[in-house]
Image (cartoon, rainbow, N blue to C red):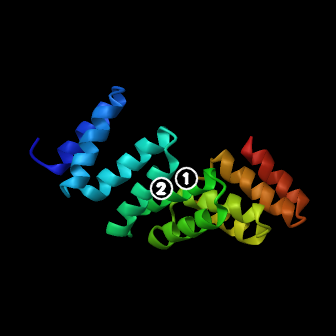
Amino acid sequence: MNNGFEYLQEAKRLQKCGLIEQATELLQFCIDNDVESCEASHQLGILKWGQHRFDEAINLIKNAIAKNPDVAQYRYNLGTMYQMLKRINEALEEYEQVLKIDPEHSGALVNLSTLYCQAGRASESEMLCRLALKNDSGSSEIWNNLGNALREQGRIDEALNAYSLAL
């Protein structure tokens, strides 16, 4: 292999083939030798998450962010990890950072709207849903989130309409 990109592609191939130990070793080699180390840390973090090694996964993703804080996908994946671990304040912070980098990031818009609604911030949730719908008006998840936000604001007829569009 001649460059870091090829190492990363090979690591992905190994992972898809179920050769997790070899993929892990290759990604660790990239990190140790500063060969595409940001993306290698990110990929290894995702791999560790899949192995339920949550602390390691989070630390690897944070390492990628420390080296390159402007990659929305790194922050989005970290936010998703925090959300799944019920570390809501940290998830909120990461999703908000994603939207500073990429204001139209659909995953961050959807997840943040969910968290805002759960936190009693229904009007902010509604705003995010409406932004997300501009890019994906056919998403059932977004229409459902919008329905939840409207319902929380007591706008029942509008909520019912949103729920019907989710179906």
* Amino acid type, mark 2: Ile
Q: Is residue 151 left or right of residue 45?
A: right
Residue at 36%, 26% (x, y): give it.
18
What separation in Å lies between label 1 and label 2 (alpha carbons)?
7 Å
Between 95 and 36, the one lying in front of the other is: 36
Quadrant of the image for the N terminus? top left
Residue at 62%, 50% (x, y): give it.
84
Disc tally is 2
As helix, strand or loop, the secondary structure at mark 1 comes to: helix
> From this viewpoint, is residue 159 visible?
yes
Between 109 and 97, the one lying in front of the other is: 97
x, y (%) of residue 106?
54, 57
Marks 1 and 2 close (CB-CB < 8 Å):
yes
Position of residue 27 relative to residue 10, above or below, is below
Specify the quadrant of the image occupied by residue 151. Answer: bottom right
x, y (%) of residue 129?
67, 61
Which disc number belongs to residue 8?
Answer: none
Specify the quadrant of the image occupied by residue 21. Answer: top left
x, y (%) of residue 153?
86, 67
x, y (%) of residue 14?
29, 31
Residue at 34%, 53% (x, y): give it.
41
Between 94 and 51, the one lying in front of the other is: 51
Q: Quickly name the residue at label 2.
A: 58
Residue neighbourhood size for the residue with mark 2, other residues' Cα within 10 Å, grouped as few (<14), some (14–19), many (≥20): many
As helix, strand or loop, the secondary structure at mark 2 comes to: helix
Q: Is residue 131 left or right of residue 34?
A: right
Marks 1 and 2, the one that precedes in the sequence: 2
* Amino acid type, mark 1: Met
Residue neighbourhood size for the residue with mark 1, other residues' Cα within 10 Å, grouped as few (<14), some (14–19), many (≥20): many
> From this viewpoint, is residue 135 visible?
no
Which disc number belongs to residue 81?
Answer: 1
